[in-house]
């Protein structure tokens, strides 16, 4: 039980920091890995009756990998930037030439 409380305390601290990441795929993957790892560790410790330490380790690893994959996949394609000026390429397609 004490280990689960330590994991939950670490989760609160890490989630408050992970929420400040920018919208680049790398930053989103890192934030997703932190949040997924903490959530996976908490669930792994809670559901493994005989070995809560091993369950937390396995759950944290699986959660971190899954969170990193989801975080990187959900990043906006332009990095979260807004277009300040629109121009046209040589084919007449609209392209953004400057960002906020």
Image: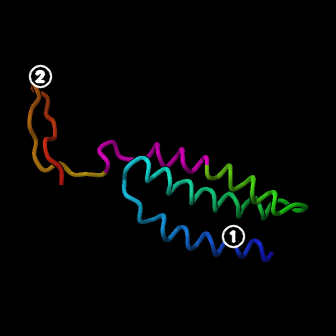
Q: Residue at x 53, y 67 (%)?
A: 15
Which quadrant would the N terminus be assigned to in this image? bottom right
Q: Residue at x 44, y 46 (%)?
A: 74
Q: Magenta segment: does it hold 74?
A: yes
Residue 37 percent coordinates (x, y): 63, 57
Residue 48 percent coordinates (x, y): 84, 59
- For marks 1 and 2, the one nearer the N-term is 1
Q: Residue at x 71, y 64 (%)?
A: 42
Classify 21 as above or below 11: above
The region drawn magenta spans: 65-79
**Which disc number belongs to residue 91?**
2
Give the image quarter of residue 38.
Answer: bottom right
Question: Which residue in the protein does label 1 denote?
Answer: 7
**Which disc number belongs to residue 95?**
none
In the drawing, does residue 21 fall left or right of residue 40? left
Q: Residue at x 79, y 57 (%)?
A: 55
Residue 34 percent coordinates (x, y): 56, 59
From the image, give the main secondary structure of the stretch colored magenta: helix
In the drawing, does residue 43 fall left or right of residue 96? right
Determine whether the residue tagged by mark 1 lies in a helix, strand or loop. helix
Determine whether the residue tagged by mark 2 lies in a helix, strand or loop. loop
Classify 9 as above or below 88: below
Residue 51 percent coordinates (x, y): 87, 60
Q: Magenta segment: does it hold 35?
A: no
């Amino acid at each position: 039980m004490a280990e689960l409380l330590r994991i939950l305390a670490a989760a609160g601290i890490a989630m408050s920091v992970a929420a400040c990441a920018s919208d680049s795929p790398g930053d989103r993957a890192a934030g997703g890995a932190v949040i997924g790892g903490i959530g996976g560790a908490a669930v792994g410790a809670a559901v493994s009756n005989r070995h809560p330490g091993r369950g937390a380790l396995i759950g944290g690893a699986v959660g971190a990998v899954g969170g990193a994959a989801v975080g990187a996949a959900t990043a906006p394609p332009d990095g979260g930037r807004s277009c300040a000026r629109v121009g046209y390429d040589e084919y007449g397609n609209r392209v953004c030439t400057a960002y906020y």
